[in-house]
Amino acid sequence: MLATDVGRWRADRVLQPRAVAASCAGHVVLRGSPDLLTPEVLAPLAGSRIDAPARFLPALGAAFERLIPWERMVWTRQAEPQPAPVPFGVTVRRLEPADTDAVHDLGLDASWLSATWGGPAGLAMSGHAWAATARNGRLLAVACTYFRGTAYEDVAVFTVPDHRRHRLALACVIALCDDIAARGRTPSWNCSVLNRASRLLARTAGFRLIREYVHYAVGSPVSHDRLNA
């Protein structure tokens, strides 16, 4: 958020906050003390995926209609990737501002990819995305930095359905990871333990598992009737 100006900080109070939530693209990191967090304070986090220590669970459970644990895996690039030859007529290159419309044309299924950059224009202008492009300029696969920290850059990737299983995603991820390393940061990867395709791509691209954790998908805020019961 500090690097891209995309997202929002929330706190229980302005001065000397006791709990802070950093949110971006539907992801929330919640830290501090949960002792004084009421359902009304937490309500703006509805519909998010929240990374929070276990001490926050009672407060989250009281604030939202549902609280679903989601097991996740974190990987970092530690090995050489497998080869990813690019088919004839396809070019792997960095996205440029002129690619904004092409990013938009990827459709709703890929809209999440640019959410942490504020949308297609932000992603195209970021300098942190690589794509496999056809001769007509169509984007076939895109890999980008999804979250950018001071030490790590978390990788996200999308391939259009009719060009999957051709290692285009792998080629884009390799180019992006080399770019991340050149910036002095470590490429990281985050996925669900149930996402076999993502796990396989990560390992093929040289990533290795370093830890597992749980974040929580929360639903709507609890109703006023329930709060006042």
Image: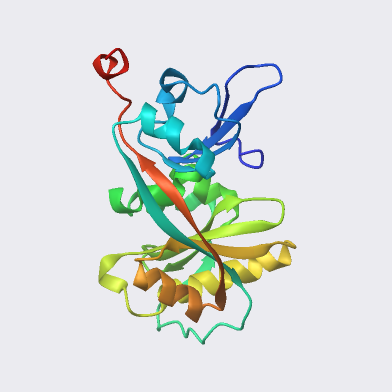
User: Where in the figure is residue 216, as x and y percent of width and height?
Assistant: 41, 45
Quarter of the rendering containing residue 221 = top left
Q: Residue at x 61, y 57 (%)?
A: 153
Residue 82 vertical placement versus 53 (above, below) = below
User: Where in the figure is residue 65, as x and y percent of width and height?
Assistant: 29, 32
Scheme of colours in the image: rainbow
212 left or right of 135 in image: right
Residue 110 vertical placement versus 38 (above, below) = below
The quarter of the image holding the N terminus is top right
User: Where in the figure is residue 109, as x and y percent of width and height?
Assistant: 30, 53
**Residue toward you, 225 or 126:** 225
The quarter of the image holding the C terminus is top left
Q: Which residue is drawn at 51% across and 49% down?
A: 123
Q: Which residue is drawn at 47% across and 85% down?
A: 85
Q: How many marks?
A: 0
User: Where in the figure is residue 154, as x and y percent of width and height?
Assistant: 56, 58
Residue ranking furthest to the top? 228
Quarter of the rendering containing residue 224 = top left
- Residue 114 visible at all: yes
Residue 200 vertical placement versus 58 (above, below) = below
- Residue 134 visible at all: no
